[in-house]
Amino acid sequence: MVYLLYEHSGFYRLITAAFLHADVEHLLNNMLLLYCCGDVVERCLGKVRFLILYFGSAIFGNLLSAAYELSTGSFYESIGASGAVFGLTGALLFSGNCQKGAAAGISLKRAVFAVVLSLYAGFGSAYVNNAAHVGGLLSGFLLGFLLSIIPPVFRKKGFSHEKDDCIFCKIANGEIPSNTLYEDDSFRVILDLGPATKGHALVMPKEHFGNLYELPDDWCQKAFSLAKKMAGQMTEKLHCDGFNLVQNNGATAGQTVPHFHIHLIPRYENDGQTINWKQTSPTAEELAACKRRNSWIRQTHVHPLKYQEKALCI
């Protein structure tokens, strides 16, 4: 590597070497690790910062490899994307550490195990550039930190449905740190900063929808399915006595942030919290509308949901 860099002015090889592999097995090994880690890291950082991380790790991995050659006096040719791929695992370790043990659904313990296993396989094999592996890993961890604190200035208008002035958009997309309980491609679940009870959490989409009325049907299904899943897991972990799912729309209904979200509120005996309303009675007009609707349904023998626009009874 050093010979090619200095004697032939081949500094471009710091990047192009990552596109060359010794054989099919070498290529498949790197692509398998890229497949396992790449999608997760891209979701955490975004596409542009992911590319910066990938190629930056490849460059720094090859630079450390060249420095190792100079220090030992042993010079050899080095090819492969393993330095870049190890950079992704380094960023994953940083992200998992910041997310208190999990990053985008992958636990920190699993990430550490994967890194240790990969390093062990490298040091236990011949003709493996472990200096590039370690260099990529360290640079990935450092770049993961630097890229996480740099705002996504490369995002273009219309590139995503994120709203620039929405604080929940920034939290959901990882631009503002949060105590994340769960994350996937579409949603983030965080602990509420002003909890009503122990474990009070929020389900929020990564794209901007002002309220339930703006939420597409497929997103609505995903949101409430996720809320059900989280409620079950939280009940099991927290041993709460009950559970409230609260979803407000509009300031009059108690919505304080104009970004759709669901409150997950574990309830405990004598927790001091109440979610009550003053009971009233339906008006005569409402009862008459229901009566007309039911009469029309019986006459036409049509399923009520198919023609729900004919009369509204709430």
Image: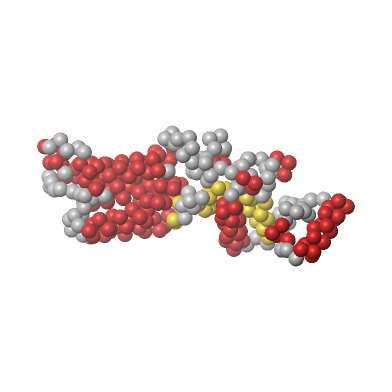
Q: Residue furthest front?
A: 300
Q: Which residue shows up at 69% across the image and 59% down it?
A: 306
In this rendering, the count of numbered labels is 0
Would you identify the image quadrant in which residue 292 lies? Answer: bottom right
| Colour approach in the figure | secondary structure
Q: Nearer the viewer, residue 103 or 293?
A: 293
Q: Is residue 59 visible?
A: yes
197 to 147, vertically: above or below: below
Q: Nearer the viewer, residue 309 or 159?
A: 309
Q: In the drawing, does residue 90 fall left or right of residue 226? A: left
Q: Is residue 223 visible?
A: no
Q: Which residue shows up at 62% across the image and 45% down it?
A: 214
Residue 291 x/y as whole percent: 84, 58
Residue 286 x/y as whole percent: 83, 52
Question: Dividing the image into 4 quarters, which one contains the C terminus?
Answer: bottom right
Residue 222 x/y as whole percent: 56, 55
Q: Which residue shows up at 56% across the image and 34% down it?
A: 165
Residue 254 x/y as whole percent: 70, 43
Question: Dividing the image into 4 quarters, which one contains the N terminus?
Answer: top left
Q: Which residue shows up at 48% across the image and 35% down it?
A: 157
Q: In the drawing, does residue 63 fall left or right of residue 298? A: left
Q: In the drawing, does residue 163 fall left or right of residue 289? A: left
Q: Nearer the viewer, residue 109 or 63?
A: 63
